[in-house]
Amino acid sequence: MKILIFYQYFTTPKGSWGTRIYEFSKEWVNKGHDVTVVTSIYSKSDLKAVKFIENQIFEGIKVKVLNIKIDNKQPIIKRIFSFILYSIISSWYAFTLKADIVISSSGPITVGIPGLISKIFSKKKLVYEVRDLWPEVPIEVGVIKNVFLKKVAYFFEKKLYENASLVVGLSPGIRDHIISNFNHKNVISVTNSANLNLFGEKKYFDDNILNENDFYGIYTGNIGEINNSFWLVDAARNLKNKNIDNIKIVLVGDGQLKPEIISIIKKEKLINLIHFDLMPKERLVPYIQNANVSFVPLSPNPILDTSSPNKFFESLAAGVPVIQTTKGWIKDYIEINNVGFNLEGSDSESLSELLIKLKNNPKILDNMKQNSRKCAVRDFDQIALSDLYLSSLLKLQTNKQ
């Protein structure tokens, strides 16, 4: 089967971004399928290009790299321009590349343009993969405010669902939202996965800032308002005010709030709040493995309750309990499986108090650590999830679904 994927943020584990498309595509190639990804260059990816368009190969995956730069710190107008330019150039491949199945993986929603062209003009079967609810999320968090743009975005979203033979939501919450709001007949949930081998093999630090005996919680990823980053800053302040210096909060990442938070660390001498720059996934592993807990905070907006953050799955794979703030499917999963704690994202005092409690009573985490790894193996193994995804694609190809 020939699979064509439109996705702007492709990376391998050498980058510092989610590797879902890489991992799944690699498994599909190993099973004899032909996979081509059309992507651009994201600042957190390991991709590089000299020419405007380059053909590269990773583990048998054919990757067409459009030398269009995307960075979360870019002004919104520049990012929108990058999204539109990618959708225009990649549409050429929607016409010219042979494929049995075309997958458009959002966001942004503009990645659906080459997917729609493949379906409408080339009669290819379209799979629309929904990573976050677009345009609902950017509208709800205030990124898209123009009334006309909202109407256009909602119209385009509706057309994508109407033309998709299969919709793949990255969480049960996304799946349920699409079914209830768009009445689509063929929607499945395939969550992000855990690389059990990468996070299961014990690794060690390559610096002297942290050591394996430190008690710390870790956050990895984007540092911004939507990620509720100041919740962690305020918790560090609370710990300092209580004269507690043997509990650390570690931030690994980049984003719009990074300069401000680094300034706060220096100005207020928050020695218990440690920041590391982005690092390749392979180097990040020991920082997660040796953490006592992992933070998965998001701003308190109901639309974000459907999210499927990579850090959640990676933490479970490393056997690290999670402290999170959403009220959707992850909250339910944590309660059912006893793999962490659910807190209010507006209450940093509850976070600092929980960290103190866990530091003084470390046995509380023992069962949670075991449960975390077991759940990763049972529910989020990347090979099992890639097979689940592939089975739906094969059914689609043979018109059985």
Image: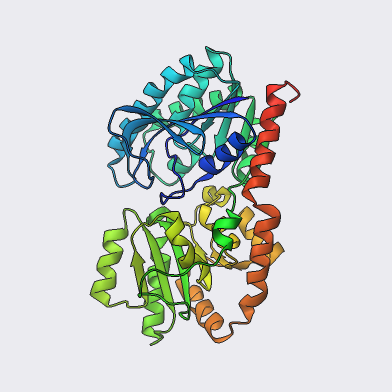
Is the N terminus in the top left, top right, bottom left or bottom right quadrant? top right
Residue 182 picture quarter: top right
State the residue in front, 216 or 262.
216
Q: Kindly identify the residue that appears in the image at 40 percent across and 86 percent down.
A: 242
Q: Residue furthest top?
A: 121
Percent of width and height locating residue 248: 42, 76
Q: How is the image coloured?
A: rainbow
Q: Is residue 263 left or right of residue 209?
A: left
173 with respect to 145 (left or right): right
Q: Position of residue 237 (x, y in %)?
A: 37, 76
Total number of numbered discs in the rendering: 0
| Res 391 quadrant in image | top right
Horizontally, residue 317 falls left or right of residue 231, namely right
Q: Is residue 299 above or below residue 120?
A: below
- Classify 35 as above or below 141: above
Viewer-proximal residue among 114 and 53: 53
The residue shown at (41%, 81%) is: 239
Relative image position of residue 283 (x, y in whole percent): 43, 60
- Whether residue 184 is visible, yes or no, is no
Point out the residue furthest to the right here. 400
Residue 326's image quarter? bottom right
Can you give x and y, in whole percent of width and height, for residue 124 in the image? 58, 18
* In this picture, residue 326 sits left or right of residue 184: left
**Is the C terminus in the top left, top right, bottom left or bottom right quadrant?**
top right
